[in-house]
Image (cartoon, rainbow, N blue to C red):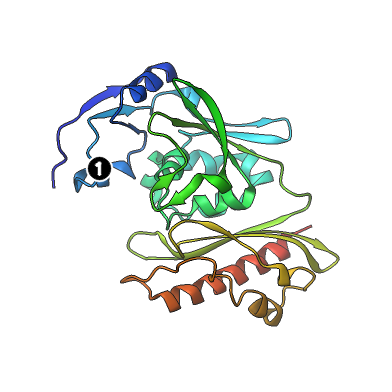
């Protein structure tokens, strides 16, 4: 199908972007991998597209004290190539390598994927596990929203229509934490049928702290509480018991790719593998 007509502007500054958003019925485009398919099928019909792909201000990965800033228009390829992320947040690279293919990673942007909020996308769960903060801008001003309050429902976020995602702030991870991302993908699309992001610290050989986030399971990525895993050695029996209800806090999706029962089973398997791998990587 052919999209309906629209105006197109290639922005030269962030101010120009914010002025354009303030006029209403405008969408931002960078890599275009999320928005253009929706426009092609007329599921989205914006009157105006504002291209932010050439704004260097929106790109880059840099340390800010103990935290790290990622510009919203930073490409997935930039994430994979980052030595800062490899050292401090390897889970981001692990998840990114499973996104799309080489062409998608070369052009797609981390901010575009997060703002799109597909309930089966990989990065939302990683940002939840890392307790990231999303920094938003509009013509009216600036505000910050925790990742854990950002994702509302399928393709719906806490952003207002006149706001843009400017950058992402990652706090310092727990000392000597191990991280892992495990995903069961739908082969044709690469989106997660069920996936888990885990961050673990250990005391001697036991799990001391655990942060677990799931995606692909329900209507949005979400944090899963697994208190019974704390203090265990992460063995199969202990985690099978601790994770028995890990998908119960969400309305589990059922579709042509997986029934709700099977998707919940995959969520438990992904969570267990992610926890065990993260535990093995913890210092």
Can see residue 182? no
- Position of 60 with respect to 156 (left or right) is right
- Which residue is under mark 1? 44
Can see residue 132? yes
Q: Is residue 163 above or below residue 264?
A: above
Residue 191 on image: x %, y %: 40, 59
Rendered image quadrant of residue 34: top left
Q: Name the residue: 32% across, 39% down.
A: 32
* Secondary structure type for disc 1: loop
Residue 3 on image: x %, y %: 16, 40
- Position of 264 with respect to 187 (left or right) is right
Residue toward you, 47 or 36: 47
Can you name the residue that lies furthest to the right here? 204
Q: Name the residue: 86% across, 66% down.
A: 204
Can you name the residue that lies furthest to the bottom here? 237
- Crowdedness near tag 1: few (<14), some (14–19) or many (≥20) residues, C-alpha within 10 Å: some
Residue 251 on image: x %, y %: 45, 67
């Amino acid at each position: 199908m052919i999209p309906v007509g629209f105006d197109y502007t290639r922005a030269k500054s962030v101010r120009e972007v914010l002025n354009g958003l303030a006029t209403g019925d405008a969408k931002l485009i960078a890599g275009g991998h999320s928005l253009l398919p929706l426009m092609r099928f007329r599921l989205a019909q914006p009157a105006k597209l504002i291209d932010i792909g050439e704004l260097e201000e929106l790109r880059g990965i840099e340390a800010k004290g103990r935290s790290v800033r990622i510009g919203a228009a930073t490409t997935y390829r930039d994430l994979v190539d980052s030595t800062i992320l490899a050292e401090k947040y390897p889970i981001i690279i692990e998840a990114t390598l499973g996104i799309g293919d080489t062409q998608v990673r070369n052009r797609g942007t981390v901010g575009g994927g997060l703002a799109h909020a597909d309930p089966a996308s990989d990065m939302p769960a990683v940002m939840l596990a890392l307790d990231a903060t999303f920094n938003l801008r509009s013509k009216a001003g600036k505000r910050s929203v925790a990742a854990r309050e950002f994702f509302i429902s399928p393709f719906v976020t806490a952003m207002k229509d006149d706001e843009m995602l400017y950058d992402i702030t990652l706090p310092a991870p727990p000392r000597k934490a191990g991280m892992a991302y495990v995903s069961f993908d739908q082969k044709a699309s690469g989106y997660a049928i069920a996936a888990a992001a885990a961050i673990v610290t250990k005391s001697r050989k036991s799990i001391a702290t655990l942060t677990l986030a799931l995606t692909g399971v329900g209507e949005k990525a979400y944090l899963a509480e697994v208190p019974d895993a704390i203090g265990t050695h992460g063995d199969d029996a202990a985690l099978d018991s601790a994770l028995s209800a890990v998908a119960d806090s969400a309305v589990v999706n059922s579709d042509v790719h997986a029934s709700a029962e099977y998707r919940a089973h995959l969520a438990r398997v992904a969570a267990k593998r992610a926890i065990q791998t993260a535990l093995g990587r913890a210092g």
